Amino acid sequence: MAASLGRLCVTGVRGVLRSRPLVSVLPVGVRALCNPPETFDVSSRYKDQPWEYLNSEEYLERYGENLVWSNYRRNHKGPIPPQKTRKKCIRAGKVCGNPCPICRDQKLHVDYRNIRLLEQFICSHTGVVHDPTKTGVCMEQYKKLVKAISDAQEHGLLTVTIQHQEVTFGEYSYNHGAVAQTPPAPAGTWYSWYEWQEPPAKEVTRLRKMYRPHLKKMMGEE
């Protein structure tokens, strides 16, 4: 009898819990823990103005005065690194192991206005973009870097390094052995066939007969 009464009580309590919503039964403190966490994009703060991340304390704590790719090393077998970098670090929403220096930090955005980030991938001596095998960035991010750097140079945000070329005026002088002075013009015509020659009479007569109707129309004769 006691066992049957216990089963009825348990089933009654279960029915009450199932019929009522869970939020009304649980206390306020427990109710807050059961709610799903709010989705927050860490990169949204720096998406419109990505250069602010490089001036923040988070960037200084993570990188300090070093470059974003200075301490990066790709996972590989043996002492010799691979000759080519990955094509992509993120495929179908899945991040590969040990992503490149840009893909591993969601707050780094490649933008032509983010000058401090672009300058880290440009050689200070030659002005050439560092090879991806040196920086470790994937090919997708490398193409974005090259485009962003060219756009920044077109907008005047980055300086363009032009190789200095020494111009020797001796190459353009007339002292070369293959260059000679222009001969003076002859007294007569340059070519003998250029002088006026009387055409043959037979040819003139043939042409007049051929174009006689046209000549009449031109002269207004009927």
Image (cartoon, rainbow, N blue to C red):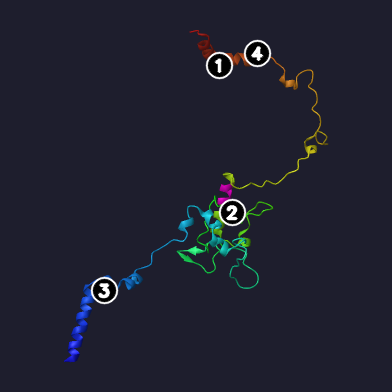
Nearest to the observer: residue 107 or residue 164: 107
Give x and y (percent) for residue 25.
26, 73
Are the residues flagged by discs 1 and 4 in contact, CB closer than 8 Å? no
Which residue matches tag 1?
A: 210
Nearest to the observer: residue 192 or residue 127: 127
Residue at x 67%, y 15% (from the top left corner): 200
Q: Looking at the image, can residue 46 be seen?
A: yes
- Separation (CA) of disc 3 from disc 4: 125 Å
Amino acid type indicated by mark 2: Arg
- On the rendered structure, is 164 left or right of 133? right
- Going from the N terminus, do you reach mark 3 or mark 1 first? 3
- Separation (CA) of disc 1 from disc 2: 82 Å
- Going from the N terminus, do you reach mark 1 or mark 4 first? 4
Q: Please, what secondary structure does the residue beneath circle 3 have? A: helix
Q: Residue 192 sits in which quadrant?
A: top right
Q: Which mark is residue 25?
A: 3
- Separation (CA) of disc 3 from disc 1: 116 Å
Give x and y (percent) for residue 52.
53, 55
Q: Is residue 35 magenta?
A: no
Nearest to the observer: residue 211 or residue 139: 139
Which residue matches tag 2?
A: 116
Residue at x 52%, y 14% (from the top left corner): 214
- Separation (CA) of disc 1 from disc 4: 14 Å
Q: Which mark is residue 99?
A: none
Are the residues flagged by discs 1 and 2 in contact, CB closer than 8 Å? no
Residue at x 61%, y 13% (from the top left corner): 205
Q: Which mark is residue 201?
A: 4
Write the start and end of the magenta stretch as one range: 148-152
- 10 Å crowding of disc 2: few (<14), some (14-19), many (20+): few
